[in-house]
Image (tube, grey):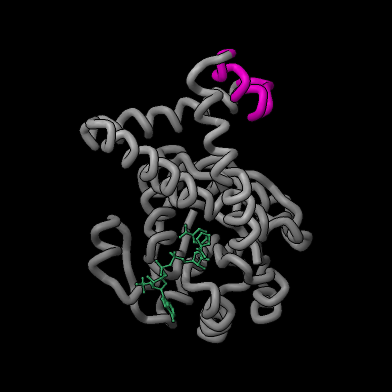
Amino acid sequence: MKVGIVGLGHMGSALVKGMVKQDELNDLQVIALSSNAKKADELGISGMSDKATFAGQDFDILMLTVPAKVTVSVLQGLVEAGLSKKTVVLSAAAGVASDDLAAVASGNTVFTFIPNIPVAVNAGTIALAQSAQASDEEKQSVHALLAALGDVVEVKPDQIGIAGVVGGCSPAFIDVLMDAMEDAAVSKGMDRTVAFDIIASVVRGTASLAQQSDLSFSDLKGQITSPGGTTIKGVLALEENGFRHAVHQAILSANK
Ligand SMILES: NC(=O)C1=CN([C@@H]2O[C@H](COP(=O)(O)OP(=O)(O)OC[C@H]3O[C@@H](n4cnc5c(N)ncnc54)[C@H](OP(=O)(O)O)[C@@H]3O)[C@@H](O)[C@H]2O)C=CC1
Ligand SMILES: O=C(O)[C@@H]1CCC=N1
């Protein structure tokens, strides 16, 4: 499979890291269009800076990981530079509608998807908007590529925005939570590195248990709050300090 990627920023680099370390993707060739030749070298892929040479590469799949506000014009530029019509376009741009992309690449099948940064370690969550125009073969090849990077969750096109927040943005919200927990542990005398190891392990384990059980998040919380114990005191402190409301506001604000 020949994959082109435009933009080696945070998201583009994370996708490349996940793709190059994944053995399931046999005969994968990744080529980037980037202003940063050093970054492509570091990632172990070919980098190009000339748009026309890149557009002529006859890609199976093209990933767009440039800033959302320039994504439509970047795609338009590649189409004008000779992008093959058989190339399936995957746009990661949050808030950019697939119709706007399809309008400038009318001969190509276009998907919108929202990956997240953990794709770098093949533990990503990838929301993929269903594409009415895609053939079964195109759907299969897109799914195979993305599944190598993490969990693929298909969503209706009108749900990609909120999926982008709970999937794409929320690693940052969880980082804020972990950072705050680490500071509190340090204030009680724990070494920061020890606190880091404990907290990262806790988040991984909590998520694994949730995925492997049939219980709701609320029921899982109920298993930890021993009657009259310490956890319920902490949970009530979270509620009294507006934690749940703050989380709602974070999700709703990011979805505006
Ligand atoms: N960061 C995340 O967790 C997620 C991001 N996304 C989406 O991914 C996209 C990129 O986000 P992110 O990686 O965070 O942003 P970055 O700013 O880190 O990277 C964007 C990259 O795009 C290229 N670029 C910048 N400006 C232009 C331009 N005017 N024309 C062409 N290329 C340009 C540059 O690549 P180079 O240096 O190689 O030229 C730059 O490094 C956005 O559309 C965002 O919505 C989606 C889900 C999650
Ligand atoms: O902050 C952003 O706009 C991107 C989209 C999802 C995560 N990062």
Between residue 254 and residue 49, name the one nearer to us. Answer: 254
Residue 219 on the magenta span? yes
Residue 58 on the magenta span? no
Q: Is residue 191 above or below residue 179?
A: above
Q: Is residue 141 above or below residue 105?
A: above
Number of numbered discs on residues:
0
Q: What residue is shown at x 29% (from left), y 72% (from top)? A: 36
Measured from the top left, where is residue 208 in percent x and y?
52, 26
In the rendered image, which quarter contains the C terminus? bottom right
Q: Is residue 71 left or right of residue 7?
A: right
- Looking at this view, name the residue that lies furthest to the top: 227
Residue bounds of the magenta highlight = 213-227
Q: Quadrant of residue 134?
A: bottom right
Q: Is residue 191 above or below residue 109?
A: above
Between residue 200 and residue 58, name the one nearer to us. Answer: 200
Measured from the top left, where is residue 159 in percent x and y?
73, 56
Q: Quadrant of residue 212?
A: top right
Q: Is residue 11 left or right of residue 141?
A: left
Q: Is residue 28 left or right of residue 144?
A: left
Q: Is residue 85 visible?
A: yes
Measured from the top left, where is residue 62 in percent x and y?
52, 65
Between residue 86 and residue 207, name the one nearer to us. Answer: 207
- Looking at this view, name the residue that lies furthest to the right: 132
Measured from the top left, where is residue 200 in percent x and y?
37, 34
Q: What residue is shown at x 23% (from left), y 67% (from top)? A: 38
Q: Is residue 27 visible?
A: no
Q: Quadrant of residue 61?
A: bottom right
Q: Is residue 154 above or below residue 8?
A: above
Q: What residue is shown at x 50% (from left), y 29% (from top)? A: 234
